[in-house]
Amino acid sequence: MGTTKVEKNLWLATLFEQKRGFRKLVSNKSVLVVGDNGTGKSSLIAKLQGRRPPKYGGGLEFGYIDVEDESNGDKTQLVVWILDGDAGHTNLLPIALNENNLGEVLVMLTVSMMVPWTWPEQLKYWINVLERHIEILPLAAEQKEAARKRLVTKWQSYCYTGSTLQPTNGCQNKEIDVDELLPLTKDALTTNIGLDLVVVVTKTDCMGAAFHMEHEYGDQHFDFMQQWIRKFCLRHGAALFYTSLKKATTCDNLQKYLFHRLYGLPFQTPPMVADQDAVLVPAGWDTLKKIDILTENIPGLDPDCDYTDIIKAPFTGSAIFNRDLEFVETVDEQAFLARQLEILRKLNQADAEGGGDSISRTHPTSTGQCSPTNPDPDGPLAKFFAKLMEKKPPISSSAGDGPVSESGRNDTEKLAAELDRLSSSIKKKKDQKKPK
């Protein structure tokens, strides 16, 4: 009886041990993908799913990624939400991120390498959107503080051993003693919104010679971009991945990191910062000292400069000036000519009365000096405007409406002769003014 009882207890102990070692993948984990339109959110997720990118999308898209633990064959599905980049769809956030799943959601924030000059504006906008959304969730202050502490603990517990037998974050498989964790380094998690964040730079395959020539970028510009966005991720406690659909390893590394971060599965890929188009920085690895190593190799660029002063948007030639439109009211042609004729008559009259002192009109003399002359009150300009004010004869609008009247033809010929006389008179005056 004693032997049977011992054997039974041994089997129970073995079963309990196996049960504790069996890790079941839960099905309540999800990824929320946010970012501006055109950053490649849907195409990236389709690549992780092993499917073709959808032709259309909008609002809040739903999907899933198959997850498998190769150590025991356990499987589940990771829920994926893709939020449209239009500001009008931010009201759909509570569906994917609410008070019931705050600790089970990882947020992936995408920007595109095609338009690197937009990074600061886009990242700041989406961080503000997420921060405002967290603030309005019906959660107690203690719950929000617990979420922030959980993120700090994950950051502090990061360790990369380089072993293929252990996950990158080995502390996830054992009890964490908070007292044994090292303090946060300088600038780490200074903005903590309590969410797991992964910043993904998409379309890095564009970083070729053509892109260099088109925007006049050199290697130092891409290093400047990298150090800036790494500092941003450091402040917000985010991981950083550069991805390209044409470079499958970058997407595979991102997928493995998502599984590692959400399910604790192994992740043996080391951090990479040397390859400009395949940067990989897990959350908790980076520090200001490591970033300073990169900034030392940026000749001619100050890393403390404003980002948009170095990475400038190209001029498209379609700039829109912010100014009020000026409306000009048109004047009737005959009224305009009458006003000009009146002005000319007053000027001529003033010249005649003042002996030419009001308006100085000079003509060169034979000695080369200029002497004033009294203009004719009915000068050529006055006659010209008076002629224009005469009633115009009706002129046919098209050749098929009939011949022009004789009187209209005579007036037209007279007007042409007058214009020829004026032009010859002006030319003669210019010739007289030339020095001999």
Image (cartoon, rainbow, N blue to C red):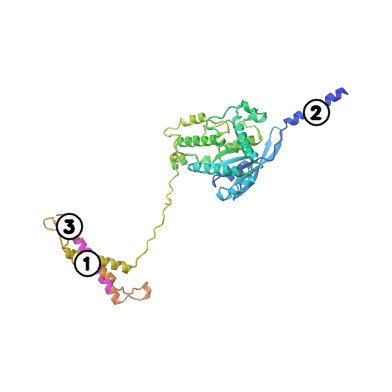
Question: Are circles 1 and 3 on residues that touch, CB within 8 Å?
Answer: no
Q: Position of residue 5 (x, y in %)?
A: 85, 25
Give the amino acid at mark 3: Lys
Q: Give me the C-alpha separation between circle 1 and circle 2.
A: 123 Å
Give the side of residue 416 with respect to residue 230, left or right. Answer: left
Q: CA distance from mark 1 to mark 3?
A: 19 Å
Q: Can you say whether 122 is above or below 298 in the image?
A: below
Specify few, some or many for label 2: CA neighbours under 10 Å numbering under 14, 14-19, or 20 or more: few
Residue nearer the viewer, 282 or 182: 182
Residue at (21% x, 62% y) in the render: 426
Circle 3 sits on which residue? 433
- The image quarter containing residue 250 is top right
Q: Mainly helix, strand or loop, the magenta region?
A: helix
The amino acid type, in three-letter code, at marker 1 is Pro
Position of the C terminus, as image quadrant, is: bottom left
Secondary element under disc 2, as helix, strand or loop, is: helix
Q: Earlier in the sequence, mark 1 or mark 2?
A: 2
Nearer to me, 387 or 233? 233
Q: Bounds of the magenta span?
A: 410-429
Return the mark for residue 12: 2
Residue 405 in percent (x, y) is at 31, 76
